[in-house]
Amino acid sequence: MASTGGYGTIVGDQCLTKFVDGGSVESLRYYLSRRTVLEMLRDRGYSVPEPDLTRSLSEFRTEFYEGDKINIERLRISASLPSNPYENVLVVFMGTEEIKKADIGRLNNQISNKESLKRLILVLQNKMNHFAKKELLKWTFPVEIFQITELLSNITKHLLQPKYEMLTTAQKQQLLNEYKAEEKQLPRMVKDDAIARYYGLKKGQVLKVSYKGGIVDSIVTYRCII
């Protein structure tokens, strides 16, 4: 029914069919993945309107479908940090074809607010070839890539997942001072880890991890991204 990939739980079409209320599996995939992206942005500190998070599947179809066809450009999400309205992120859902260098060029021409754009997230439904990936390296801001199947469920909502909290630079320094430790002495988490990718963490950032239940009431540990 479901398999676990490098990012999280990947739900197969057979399982998705159980949740479709007379609509297409495609619309459910778009709905679930877009909702996970919105939750991910909110957890990173971006402003996300509550109605976007609570939109129902039927409301989603009304909003983003024209007849039985998805308007994929309308799926795009633009958000900013409350503390800095010029710190913007853009999420773009790509089509079902293989992503080529020309597709990246067209996308580059479509983005109008490059000055304030600090991060781009691409949601793919197919592979991206080598030349397209090289083209993205020329861009002046970070580009994150997720497959749509990685976003069908929110891995941070799993019952067995602990609570995660990103430390600020000041909080990180306070932690190091408190334990009289150096950064290299902290437990590590690779930047390609599913949780690090979810929160968009960079090398050197520290994640506070809180566990509850089990043999002890609570355990707090930390992970430094490498």
Image: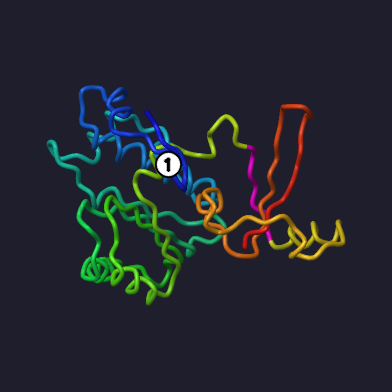
Q: Amino acid at mark 1?
A: Thr
Q: How is the image coloured?
A: rainbow
Tell me what residue is drawn at x 28 percent, y 65 percent: 129
**Quadrant of the rendered structure where residue 114 is?**
bottom left
Question: Per the image, is 166 magenta?
Answer: yes
Quick one: 97 or 118, which is closer to the camera? 97
Instruction: Answer with left or right where residue 41 lies relative to residue 172.
Output: left
Q: Residue at x 22, y 53 (%)?
A: 95
Location of residue 45 with respect to 214 vertically, above or below:
below
Split into 4 quadrants, where in the image is the N terminus? top left
Residue 222 image offset from top left, x and y in percent: 72, 50
Question: Looking at the image, which residue sits at the far bottom?
Answer: 138
Q: Residue at x 29, y 61 (%)?
A: 128
Stretch of the chain drawn in magenta: 162-168
* Residue at 29% from the left image edge and 57% from the top image edge: 127
Q: Work out whether 157 lies above or below 80.
A: above
Q: Few, some or many C-alpha atoms within 10 Å of disc 1 (few <14, some 14-19, many ≥20)?
A: many
**Mark 1 — residue?**
36
How far from the left and from the top, in percent, is residue 148?
A: 34, 46
The C terminus: image quadrant: bottom right
